[in-house]
């Protein structure tokens, strides 16, 4: 069985989703392949690379239109061609997601916990804070308290400031070491649904581990296969990772499958990235023709990629 044979189930799995999440797949491609190469793409070239996986031109155009309506993308005409790029808001979301998707896990922890108190907020404000902080990985300790053991404090401060609640939403940091490790375990168990995350990681591993093994056995992969493998890999990893609070390993089970999922993603991405970039360069276009070369930060993804 070749690599192409193994990719077909990935395509079939995506196509079986109800409703079909074409817009989400376009977002994945933008963040993974287009944003590092200037961030502008001709819609016709996007249609060209998505049609082989069973997406019609009508479905793709509708999904792109909805992303514009949602404020994620903007478009402009140049003659008869439509070009799409990220809005400022869309780029801010991409930049934050990129740090999580392609960053390396934080294996250290100083024992400090961060608690955000929302008891002074109005219901609408509390809902907005909970939504944003869930995105940052915070768990719900109780109605008025959100917690995380290792947040990035500058990002937390930025979200609270943007929401206009920085002055009325106390942030407390401290160690629970003196109260014993059992309390930390209890906080984790009651504040996050790790079982559902672990099951999602396990499904992803079962999907992609055979593909990595097949490529390693063959020693090569066609550029198109590499691109679609990379796209579906990041698409599936992203869906689970962005729900993952990314707790320190010290607070997770020793057999935590999130670690294995990261290692698989890193290894498979590194294996296919060179060939997939050949495909992107030949098939994706902007106003000037081929997309620009990847940014320097692209090669820092997942602990470092080999620049050809």
Image (spheres, helix red, strand yellow):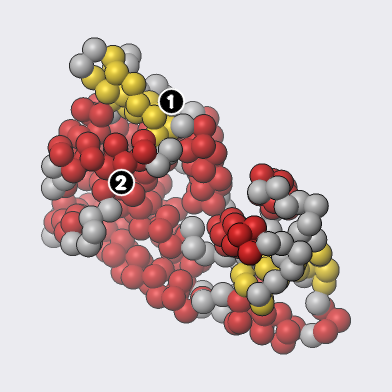
Please identify the quadrant where the N terminus is shown. bottom left
Residue 61 visible in the shown view: yes
How packed mark 2 is, by other alpha carbons closer than 10 Å (few <14, some 14-19, many 20 or more), is some
Q: Residue at x 29, y 37 (%)?
A: 65
Q: Is residue 149 left or right of residue 10?
A: right
Residue 38: mark in rendering = 1
Q: Residue furthest right?
A: 178
Q: Residue at x 36, y 67 (%)?
A: 205
Residue 116 visible in the shown view: no
Q: Is residue 237 above or below residue 296?
A: below
Counting residues from the start of the chain, the first of labels 2 and 1 encountered is 2
Residue 217 location in percent, x, y?
25, 56
Q: Quadrant of residue 73?
A: top left
Q: Residue at x 28, y 53 (%)?
A: 21
Please identify the quadrant where the C terminus is shown. top left
- List the residue tagged with mark 2: 23
Given residues 210 and 206, the one toward you in this image is 206
Residue 146 location in percent, x, y?
68, 68
Mark 2 against mark 1, which lies toward the viewer? 2
Residue 255: mark in rendering = none
């Amino acid at each position: 069985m070749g690599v192409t044979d193994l990719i077909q189930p990935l395509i079939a799995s995506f196509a079986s989703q109800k409703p079909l999440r074409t817009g989400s797949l376009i977002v994945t491609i933008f963040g993974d392949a287009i944003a590092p190469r200037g961030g502008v793409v001709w819609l016709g070239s996007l249609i060209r690379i998505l049609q082989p996986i069973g997406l019609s031109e009508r479905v793709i155009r509708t999904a792109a239109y909805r992303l514009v309506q949602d404020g994620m993308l903007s478009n402009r005409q140049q003659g008869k061609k439509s070009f799409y790029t990220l809005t400022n808001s869309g780029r801010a979301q991409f930049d934050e997601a990129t740090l999580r998707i392609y960053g390396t896990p934080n294996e250290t922890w100083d024992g400090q916990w961060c608690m955000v108190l929302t008891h002074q907020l109005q219901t609408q404000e509390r809902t907005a804070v909970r939504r944003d902080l869930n995105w940052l990985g915070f768990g719900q300790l109780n109605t008025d308290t959100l917690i995380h053991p290792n947040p990035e404090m500058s990002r937390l401060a930025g979200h609270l400031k943007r929401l206009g609640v920085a002055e009325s939403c106390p942030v407390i940091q401290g160690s629970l070491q003196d109260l014993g490790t059992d309390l930390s375990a209890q906080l984790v168990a009651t504040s996050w649904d790790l079982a559902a995350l672990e099951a999602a990681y396990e499904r992803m591993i079962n999907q992609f581990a055979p593909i990595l093994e097949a490529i390693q056995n063959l020693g090569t992969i066609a550029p198109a296969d590499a691109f679609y493998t990379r796209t579906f890999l990041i698409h599936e990893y992203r869906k689970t990772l962005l729900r993952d609070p990314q707790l320190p390993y010290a607070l997770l089970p020793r057999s935590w499958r999130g670690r294995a999922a990261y290692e698989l993603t890193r290894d498979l991405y590194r294996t296919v990235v060179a060939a997939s970039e050949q495909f992107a360069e030949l098939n994706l276009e902007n106003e000037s023709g081929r997309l620009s070369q990847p940014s320097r930060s692209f090669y820092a993804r997942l602990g470092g990629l080999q620049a050809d």
